[in-house]
DNA sequence: CTGAAAGCGCTAACAA
DNA sequence: TTGTTAGCGCTTTCAG
């Protein structure tokens, strides 16, 4: 102990010296690059632990000349819908982690075709990304994919939903049941409510996936608990036919003018904006979900009173930045499962709800 | 054009060569370190522009062995109050910008003493930080401070409030009037309201600073506009005497049992939690501001119905990370003035309102 | 399975 | 006012 070990931050060189190996070997151990004897690994890890060594991310990123590529596997989307917002979050998020020079590689699959999902999985594996973000439309196929990623030593994160028991690095999502209950509260509180119109998309009832079932259940449960005598009327509208939607709503509300509380548990409340605008009713209350641009417009126009959502781009950003941080440091995030806070959006507070990171 | 200028990212070396100067000179120009001829500056900036050069932050941080110190000048606080939350946001934020190795240096001043503020300003200038974050309790003293910082070429940011016309790098705050209006809406909407109790702190009425005046005005304006016949009763309580507070409230509500709508425009709604708990009243509605821990407790206990706030730690984080990013890149943030979104907190959505960055 | 050595792009003395 | 030079701590061939 002769000199300069005051508040010296340990470097890879210190670790190498203390462990009696070369710097390259320490690097191999930290990032699990393989090809190191088990006993050496133990020795090195011990020293890392003892010295409290953490890689200097600046040096690390500088030396490795390539960008960190993170493949994002998400459903195909149309401009303005849920996944389009999430998608922008990934792009903006990657840009923001500027020191990490992270690159996104977006893969879109057709949510109606498991084959298309599998094809994208293959393509991702073949491209050897540094990490992967995926979601959970096809649970079984996702499990297979996860195993292949484990094998290839490619870390992955879940966004929006997750599958228990897999080896994911981090997860960011929301509790849909909580969202449903909150929506029900906002729609009905301070009132005695006897009738609610719950509008659903026709595709909800067909097909395998009903992504908003749990949210809807949360909504309904809350109503049952707090307004036990309230009737919930279900109306189905087609997702892509405005005229038919209009006629359906017109027919329903002509027959049931007493129904003044309206909700949709999916993210498409904007689909009924046109009807609402053309058929104003005093004391009508409308609550929707998710901060799609068109929903916010309906909110600002006063057609929708509340929107329950979580910050979608922020959720994307959290996911990608935590995964990137793991990729760089080799250290697992403090919290593996992270739930987003539910936001209540109203005309009076929708103004600055943007992505500032 | 013989080789490798395909998608080559320009380095400082490219800029230097193209401008016919040394790399060090380019560095001097980018970070405005001074001592460069005006004509050289122009020439270099031109080349930077033309090549679209951006400094590689990893290389930059690696080469400069010191940490970036950001001095934060904020009012003294007690555990749990507004500035204690903001303070934690700075610390956590600095930790999160890990690649940037940012260090905070917190300076606290006594909000009742301009001398104490000036002393901290001196101490900050003497310590030569890379950047400064300050707020605006003593406007004139802040202006002086800003001038000295300009002179010393130390960039600074405002948090919470700002002063127009100064040369700050970035600002994050909220529109207090908007918050007040939103609070008024949440307290009264869906009701005909005839009486509101607005509870204030005694110190509000003395002293120079009344930090919540604008918020209070926003609240009152909204009520005047939407409930023109509503009476607003003002009650003053001492900030540090629970017993006296209790007696004051008891006396008021004994005399005015018809008053069932209650608010405080400052961040201390938790001060009346004890009274509310011990004197339950059906149909009472209480709205407060700011997400202090004790306020959230009162919210979760059902004593307070809504809390209007913005994410305080996030506001701190945004401020410090944007300032740091400027310090590193030398490029001004896209938006200089940034307003935080107002959050509506309710028992049903307070659960995951934490700092995830 | 492990080590040596050559940079990554930048900053900071120092020299001129 | 400007240029030269020696690293920062790490990754990555390439040898062994």
Image (tube, coloured by chain):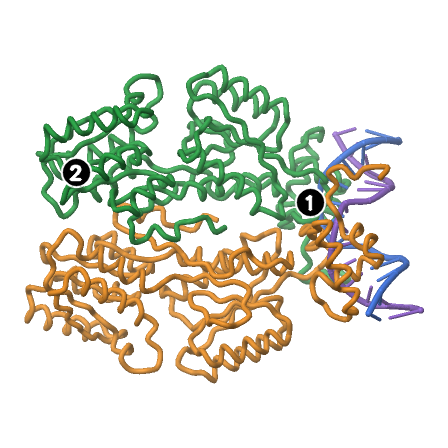
Chain colours: A orange, B green, C blue, D purple
Q: Tell me which chain the residue with mark 1 is part of.
A: B
Q: Quadrant of residue B230?
A: top left
Q: Residues within 10 Å of mark 2 (few under 14, many from 20)?
A: some
Q: Nearer the viewer, residue A308 or B146?
A: A308
Q: Nearer the viewer, residue A189 or D9?
A: A189
Q: Can residue B11 be spotted in the picture?
A: no
Secondary structure of the residue carrying tag 1 is: helix
Q: Residues within 10 Å of mark 1 (few under 14, many from 20)?
A: some
Q: Position of residue B111 (x, y in %)?
A: 43, 22
Q: Position of residue B336 (x, y in %)?
A: 46, 38
Residue at the far bottom in the pictured view:
A115
CB-based contact (under 8 Å), mark 1 and mark 2:
no
Q: Quadrant of residue B267?
A: top left
Total labels: the figure holds: 2
Q: Nearer the viewer, residue A305 or A234?
A: A234
Instruction: Name the residue: 83% across, 59% down.
Output: A22
Q: Position of residue C3 (x, y in %)?
A: 88, 61
Q: What is the C-alpha distance between the residues marked 1 and 2? A: 57 Å
Q: Nearer the viewer, residue B4 or A223?
A: A223
Q: Where does the N terminus of chain B fall, quadrant-wise?
A: bottom right
Is residue A195 toward the left or the right of residue B158 in the image?
A: left
Work out whether B200 lies above or below A277.
above
Give the labeled residue for mark 1. B60
The earlier-in-sequence mark between 1 and 2 is: 1
Instruction: Name the residue: 42% across, 58% down.
Output: A339
Give the labeled residue for mark 2. B261
Q: Position of residue A47 (x, y in %)?
A: 76, 54
Q: Can residue A279 be spotted in the picture?
A: yes
Work out whether A200 lies above or below A49.
below
Closer to viewer: mark 1 or mark 2: 2
Q: Quadrant of residue B119?
A: top right
């Amino acid at each position: 102990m002769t000199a300069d070990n005051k508040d010296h931050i340990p470097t890879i060189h210190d670790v190498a010296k203390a462990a009696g190996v070369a710097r390259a070997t320490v690097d191999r151990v930290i990032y699990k690059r393989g090809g190191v004897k088990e006993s050496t690994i133990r020795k090195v890890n011990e020293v890392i632990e003892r010295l409290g060594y953490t890689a200097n991310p600046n040096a690390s990123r500088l030396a490795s000349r390539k960008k960190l590529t993170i493949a994002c596997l998400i459903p195909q989307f149309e401009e303005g819908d849920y996944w389009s917002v999430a998608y922008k979050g990934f792009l903006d998020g990657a840009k923001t982690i500027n020191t990490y020079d992270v690159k996104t590689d977006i893969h879109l699959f057709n949510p109606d075709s498991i084959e298309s999902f599998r094809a994208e999985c293959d393509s991702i594996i073949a491209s050897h990304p540094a990490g992967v973000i995926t979601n959970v439309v096809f649970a079984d196929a996702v499990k297979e994919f996860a195993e292949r990623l484990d094998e290839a030593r490619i870390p992955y994160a879940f966004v929006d939903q997750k599958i228990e028991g897999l080896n994911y690095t981090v997860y960011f999502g929301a509790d849909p049941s909580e969202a449903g209950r909150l929506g029900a509260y906002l729609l009905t509180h301070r009132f005695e409510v006897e009738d609610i119109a719950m509008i659903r998309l026709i595709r909800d009832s067909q097909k395998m996936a009903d992504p908003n079932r749990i949210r809807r259940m949360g909504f309904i449960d809350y109503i049952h608990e707090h307004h036990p005598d309230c009737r919930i009327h279900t109306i189905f509208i087609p997702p892509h036919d405005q005229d038919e939607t209009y006629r359906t709503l017109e027919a329903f509300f002509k027959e049931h003018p007493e129904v003044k509380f309206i909700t949709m548990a999916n993210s498409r409340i904007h689909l009924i904006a046109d009807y609402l605008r053309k058929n104003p009713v005093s004391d009508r209350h409308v609550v929707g979900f998710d901060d799609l641009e068109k929903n916010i417009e309906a909110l600002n126009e006063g057609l929708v009173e509340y929107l329950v959502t979580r910050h979608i781009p922020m959720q994307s950003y959290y996911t990608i930045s935590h995964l990137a941080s793991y990729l760089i440091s080799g250290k697992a995030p403090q919290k593996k499962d992270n739930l987003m806070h539910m936001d209540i959006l109203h005309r009076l507070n929708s103004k600055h709800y943007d992505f500032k990171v």
